[in-house]
Image (cartoon, grey):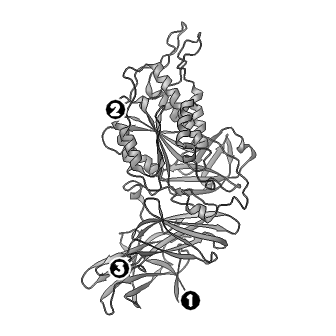
Amino acid sequence: MSRLVKALLASAGLATLLALPAGAQERSARLLAIDFQAFDAAGALVRDLSPAEIDLRIDGQARVVRFVRRIAAAPPPEGAEAATVRLAPPYGTSADSASGRLFVLVLDEDSFRAGREQPFRNGVIGLLDQLGPTDYVTVIGMPYGGVKVPLTNDHTRARHAIELSSGQRSADETGSEMACRTRLLLESLESVLQSMGARTTPATVILLTAGLAAPRRDAPMALAPGMCELQSELFRRVGRAAGVARANFYIAQPDDLGASAGAAGESISGSGFRGSNNPLIGIEDLSGVTRGIRIPLTARGTDALDRVAVETSTYFVAEIEPELEDFDPRSHRLEIRTSRSEVTIRARPEITFVRPRTTTAATRLTVSDMLTSMSTFSDLPLRAAAYTMGAGLTSDGQVQVALVAEPLDRAVALASVGAVLVNDDGGIVARWSAVDAGESPIMGAMRVPPGRYRLRVAAVDEAGRAGAADYRVEAALTQVGPLSLGDLVLGLSRDERLIPRLEFSDEPSVLASFEIYGGVEGQAVSALLEIAASTNGPALVSVPLAIRAEGDGRFLAIGTVPLGALAPGDYAVRAVVQLESGASGRTIRTLRKVR
């Protein structure tokens, strides 16, 4: 690593910025986690896999996969995977948690000629437009540009940095010069990956380059290697560093990039020693050692990197029992396949494990740690959901967000539970903590202004296991003429009251209820409860809703959803309200039935 690169990284504090909070990297010492992606024959993300379908090998040795978890790192972009999702999820879980993503944008400035920057600007701007407030980005110019934008979720800063970047390549670059700048780029790239530390969650590295040299001696065999010698080992070192940093690579290049010269092998006379000047071969070499995906960039449109936004929205984690040799400091060869037909697994070719630290009472994660972290915590399987109520129909204009949470294993005893609501700027706007963590299910409420939020619920059980679940909340009431509708709540009737449930199985029926605000006694209102296979699909079942006055202009609509005849799956439960004036509206909830 060059002194210049070291100084640039140190001055920007990149190692600190790319590292997660101290407790965030900790996982149970019992299992090792290995992330990968899965795609079907059409290239769409696979939504479920079982351990029995995974063939995982380390250094050629088959390992037993104990668990497979699907992690939703971000909501898929509109118009992409969203088209295949019928319904909103009924809840968020610690195994399917919106923890945000980390993007490292590496701009190979010396590879672009001045005036040819538009393709990479368009691609990056299109990607940034699809990122959410929990997605963090850093922009790094290489080999000499340094950290242009430290890690931030202010995507406007990243956009400005890209728009101001310009190419530095000379018009008459020789093959030797290309080899020299490629060597500098690879050394700098290795340094950035090393600064990220040994991660347990994936990062996405997007290298924007207009060409890399292939390995070459840059001198005849009879002489010492030339000053621009480029060894294949340097490519392999980047691949190993990517395995430690859990970095998934995308290499974006201009779509019109072509060979400037063919390959040339050294003859017996010592001529032709320089190797290939084809700028694509070095890109192919880097793609091979990182299992990176090559993406062509165009000067027209901003959708070149759309697939990155889609593919990084979801990944799987396979958990295996550790073995002593796993913690050797060397890199291990990683192979992951699946027995499911027409499904392709994408994983890095190498991986390095870090020996877990001994967890003591002093180093255990707390609820507060998890609520303020962007990381995924899934040692304690947990699920959570939220409902908007109209308790805030007062002069302050706030609404009440009610939360429901429970461990997936209802026999687990929780020691502490807390929750926050996070706005689109990443700021915490409300906090809550459970008075009685043993309540089942856990229920609480927070008051906030209407808007879009992320609910994050965190819990620690009596064994010290920690889990956090995220759920997207649209904190707003549904307007129907002069009336306002709260969210639909599904549950079971216990002691003449509704107890919310997030998942159902063999129950014969489900109680559905929501509140109506702003009504008056005797007002003509009709309400119907429907079950459908999709949000706007035809009703499979329709039942009337009973409406009763609760006082102070508040009414309660209640109905029973027949569940016994429905096959396992997700269903839309729609409460449709219509007034005598003809105004109508609906509130919808996803019901999940499992075997």
295 relative to 273 in the view: left or right: left
Q: Residue at x 50, y 18 (%)?
A: 275
Say how many tags the image has: 3
Mark in the foreground, 2 or 1: 2
**In x, y percent, where is residue 451?**
39, 67
The residue under label 1 is: 495
308 relative to 333 in the view: left or right: left
**In x, y percent, where is residue 283?**
48, 31
**In x, y percent, where is residue 504?**
54, 74
The residue under label 2 is: 116
- The alpha-carbon separation of the residues under discs 3 and 1 comes to 28 Å
Residue at disc 1, secondary structure:
loop
**Type of amino acid under label 2:** Arg
Labels 3 and 1: the sequence-earlier one = 3
The residue under label 3 is: 484
Mark in the foreground, 3 or 1: 3
Q: Residue at x 56, y 58 (%)?
A: 373
96 relative to 425 in the view: left or right: right
Residue at disc 2, secondary structure:
loop
Q: Quadrant of residue 398?
A: bottom left
Image quarter where the N terminus lies is: top right
Labels 3 and 2: the sequence-earlier one = 2
Contact (Cβ within 8 Å) of mark 3 with mark 1 = no
